Amino acid sequence: MTCGNPARYGAPVTIPMRAFLCVLLVAGLGAGASAQPFPESEGDFVIPRYTFRNGQTLQDLRLHYRTIGTPIRDAAGHIRNGVLIMHGSSGDASQVLAASMRGPLVGPGLPLDPATHFLIYPDILGAGKSSKPSDGLRAAFPKYGYHDLVDLEHRLVTEHFGIERLRLVMGISMGGMHTWLWGIRYPSMMDGLLPISSLPVKVDGRNLLWRRILVNAIRTDPAWMNGNYTEQPRGFLNIMPMFDMLVQSPSRLAERLNTYDAADAYVREVVDETLDEDDANNILYRFEASFDYDPAADLHRITAPLLAILFADDELNPIELGVIEPLMAQLKNGRHIIVPAGSETEAHRTQVKAAIWARHVGEFMKGLAR
């Protein structure tokens, strides 16, 4: 199991903290976690041959997933309690199963109570145990976009789990972007939508620039060899701490990194984590996949109730751009909440500090029609 960089879960980067978070993740502990066991499982959905929107194909495409809870069927035999929860582009399902995310949301009496909800956590294509370039195809892996990824998530839900309508679709960052697309592409398939730390506009400005800086650092690395390297190229790793810095709160960084030694240790930790847990081709594919994300003109297609949760100190989705208010006006039944910056917020990473925003999820779930 990959527990990932603990800084992504709103904690300083230290090896002991990483080990501690891994223990919490495996044990399912944390604030609000259940003393009562709920069924948990993991598995794979394999598509024998999948054709991407660009015409490329992949044999035996694998989508890995984890679940918590039990499907509940109505009188007609249809599963009505499914909840799809999607991770961001810098992680896999373990990101949204981390204690800081799971603890305040999943448990008896919490917004996503496994006694009443069947929670589905996919490893999105290109991440975790799902098919990805590093499995062997490397640069020959098909080029995919967000619409491909959403189509695959839909097939997992409908074909593998047999779910025709979900109680909730939610996600963080990239998963939040996918949530917007779910509402547009499958407007009658969910009771509610909950995109977190994402905007329903094409990737541009700062968000586009850092992606291109990272992608170009990989492509111009002499050791990349057009993606056909046998050992990880290292040059692009100098960019990873810059990306890591961009998704963090300047205030929290100032508190943690107040000496040269602390800053140098942080840089080394980010580099080591990247080498240990990821792959240059995987990173390149994931961060180029947003090329076809541009939902703004189609927001009127969304009919399900939608709550967008944003963070005032998130520099990847800057509130000061003023785009969210006019876009939300296009929705028939949508609203947004901007969580103010504070002593506990972590900028973009507040997305996995669910204790800060879980109450909004609870209120939203209570308001959904049965």
Image: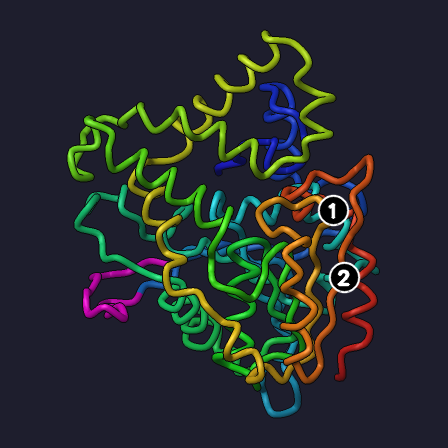
Q: Nearer the viewer, residue 361 or 49?
A: 361
Sooner in the amino-acid sequence: mark 1 or mark 2: 1
User: Per the image, is 56 magenta?
Assistant: yes
Q: Residue at coordinates 58% horizontally, 39% vertically from top-left?
A: 247
| Residue position for label 1 | 103
Q: Nearest the camera: 208 or 122?
A: 208
The amino acid beneath tag 1 is: Gly
Height in image: 147 above or below 26? Answer: below
Front one among 329 and 230: 329
Quadrant of the image containing the C terminus: bottom right
Q: Quadrant of residue 13?
A: top right
**Residue 362 counted in the magenta span:** no
Residue that badge 2 annotates: 337
Dominant SS in magenta: strand
- The residue tagged with tag 1: helix, strand or loop? helix
Snapshot quadrant of residue 279: top left
Q: Which mark is residue 183?
A: none
Mark 1 or 2: in front is 2
Please determine whether, in this image, residue 210 is positioned above or below residue 295.
Answer: above
Within 10 angstroms of label 2, few (less than 14), some, or many (20 or more) residues? Answer: some
Identified at 80% across, 61% down, the residue is: 360
| Label 2 secondary element | strand
Q: Is residue 279 left or right of residue 347?
A: left
The part of the chain drawn in magenta is 47-63
* Rendering coords of residue 30 (x, y %): 75, 40
